[in-house]
Amino acid sequence: MALIFFGKDPNTNGDDCPTVWVHDTSADLVLQGMKADQQTEAECLVFGHIPDTEAVIRIPARMVPLIRRACDEAERRAALQ
């Protein structure tokens, strides 16, 4: 397994910040983000349970270009499978 790095939040110091990767074989997006606050989680729970194996995270809107590039790469890799 290898992760393809797409970038970190451009408005941080580069440490401990939201990050975007694509898994090279599964084509899954891998995201590091800020844990959602209790109010946000409560709003998400209106739509269904959040299993212990999942988390609600927040990704700053300014990271959309990085995520878009990662999505394009994930889509390309998934098509090769």
Image (cartoon, helix red, strand yellow):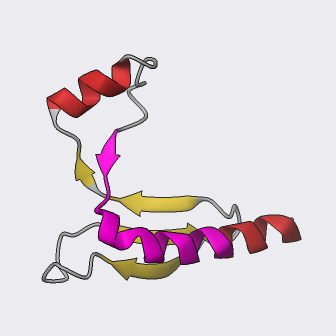
Residue 78 position in % (x across, y down): 78, 64
- Is 7 contained in the magenta span? no
Instruction: State whether residue 31 is above or below residue 80.
Output: above
Residue 40 position in % (x across, y down): 24, 33
- Is 59 contained in the magenta span? yes
Q: Which quarter shows the N terminus?
A: bottom right
Q: Is residue 40 left or right of residue 12?
A: right
Q: Is residue 76 left or right of residue 45?
A: right
Could you say which quadrant of the image residue 22 lies in? bottom right
Could you say which quadrant of the image residue 80 lies in? bottom right
Instruction: State whether residue 17 is above or below residue 45.
Output: below
Nearest to the observer: residue 23 or residue 70: 70
Residue 7 position in % (x across, y down): 39, 81
**Numbered range of the magenta stretch:** 56-72
Instruction: State whether residue 42 is above or below residue 6.
Output: above
Q: Is residue 80 left or right of residue 33?
A: right
**Which residue is drawn at the image coordinates 40% and 25% (left, top)?**
50
**Which residue is drawn at the image coordinates 29% and 24% (left, top)?**
43
Could you say which quadrant of the image residue 69 lies in? bottom right
**Which residue is drawn at the image coordinates 67% and 68% (left, top)?**
74
Nearest to the observer: residue 44 or residue 25: 44
